[in-house]
Image (cartoon, rainbow, N blue to C red):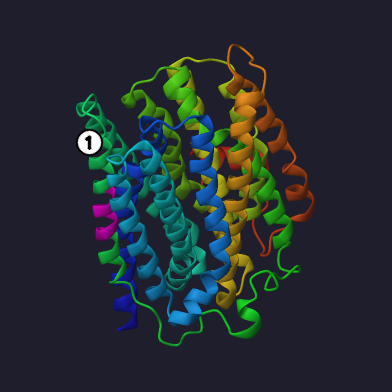
Amino acid sequence: MQKHRVKNSISASMKDGAAWAMMSGFADPYSVPFALAMGAGTMGVGVLRSFPALASAIFQIFTEKLVLRLGSCRRALLLTVMIQALSLFVSACAGFLPPAAGLPLFVAMAVAYMVAGNMSGPPWAVLMGEYIPASKRGNFFGFRSQLVGLVFFAGSFIASQLLGVWQGRGLWGFFLIFTGAGVFRLISFYYLTLMYEPRTCFHLPRGGAGVDFLGSLDFRRGRVPALFFSVLVLLFSTYLSAPYFSVYTLKELGCGYTRYMVLMTIGPLMTYLFMRRWGQAADGYGSVKILKAAFLLVPVVPLLWTLSRNFYYLAAVETFSGIIWGAYLIGMNNFLYESVPVHSRAGYNAFLSFTTGLAQFGGALLGGWLYQSLPPLAGSAFVSLLLVSAALRVLSVAPMFLLVRETRDVRAAGPVELLLFMSGFKPLVR
């Protein structure tokens, strides 16, 4: 009976992933264009991309407590998903208000959207960790990510076409795509109601010290704090420039919505498509090895963006970027499952979201100021910002390589062997 429930839960998680991807494809790439259409400037974009991240980081402190208060990962998951869906419906209506009211409301709903979305992640991760055997996690999450990536790309393309059709008719196009995003999140909510949660409750956070958000970190366990520090530096440096690619693409490069959609979504698509391969590599060669590859290559991406404004070249750069960020995501996912006890997974995943939120807040806010203050290079201050971002990303490499170690025995592999496997020229030998 339990095996049947687990099988049905895995099936439901795939359908939930597809619905979530449609929601994300409709909403995430178009929040900045929506704000720009309502009259936001560069600092307005900085506020939109930073304050939701700060609020999300703060609220991650309460994720474990929410799970304990409700006595269920599933109930905590459903509550946060419903809040996220409602935030999208309200966001859709913000464009019909005067800018003085519409923009603040949109930012407030962006806060609710990100807070609820990030708080849903840890309890979802705990449930999924109970369904999938340890030896198959990388392969499964990679396969699921491929599905999510294809649906995300399709959703983003449909949204760009809707915006193109409704261009010149006010903000009705944005109303349609954000309303559609809310509907897809409700579909996701339905499939999440079908997921099974073990009644033993051994997967839930423990009382007392278990709800001590910072004190629960174990400094002996796989050098997790060193990894989180590297993540903080890497993501802070990344978010210096990341929120402003939309501004650069739409305003400085003059891209239409279709080309904008390609540049903003080809990276996430490649991330999702390659995550299964990265997951297989992490299962065989170790998650830390995959993370080190990501940390080495991520600083290269902003440097490549400075070399040309050609659309096809930039699409190729984003393809490369997406593949590398796939290594980061699957490496972090697997490392936490390998390094953290079952009852602490919600807390550690919440702490990762907390770290990500702090990095996004600080990086986006400082990046907005630098975008307006740095002297232009090659005719754009954004190029200067990219160089600063690249230089700071390099600083994250040292603690990652010096302090973070594998927590299990894995097959030895050098860069060439890993590259051959990722390219499909070498099978994975266990």
Q: How many marks?
A: 1
Q: Quadrant of the C terminus?
A: bottom right
* Residue placed most toward the observer, 100 or 314: 100
Residue 168 in view here: yes
Name the spot of residue 290 as percent of width and height, x first.
61, 48
Residue 23 sits above or below residue 255 on the image: below
Residue found at x 46% / y 62%? 121
Q: Which portion, as a residue range, is magenta?
A: 181-187
The residue most toward the bottom is: 200
Residue under label 1 = 172
In which quarter of the view is residue 263 placed?
Answer: top left
Q: Judge from the rendering whether residue 332 lies leftward or rightward of residue 74; answer left or right.
A: right
Check disc 1 and give the amino acid type. Answer: Trp
| Residue drawn at x 27%, y 40% as measured from the top left | 96
Q: Quadrant of residue 38?
A: top left
Looking at the image, which residue is at 33% across and 64% down? 82
Q: Is residue 117 above or below residue 383?
A: below
Residue 183 forms part of the magenta stretch: yes
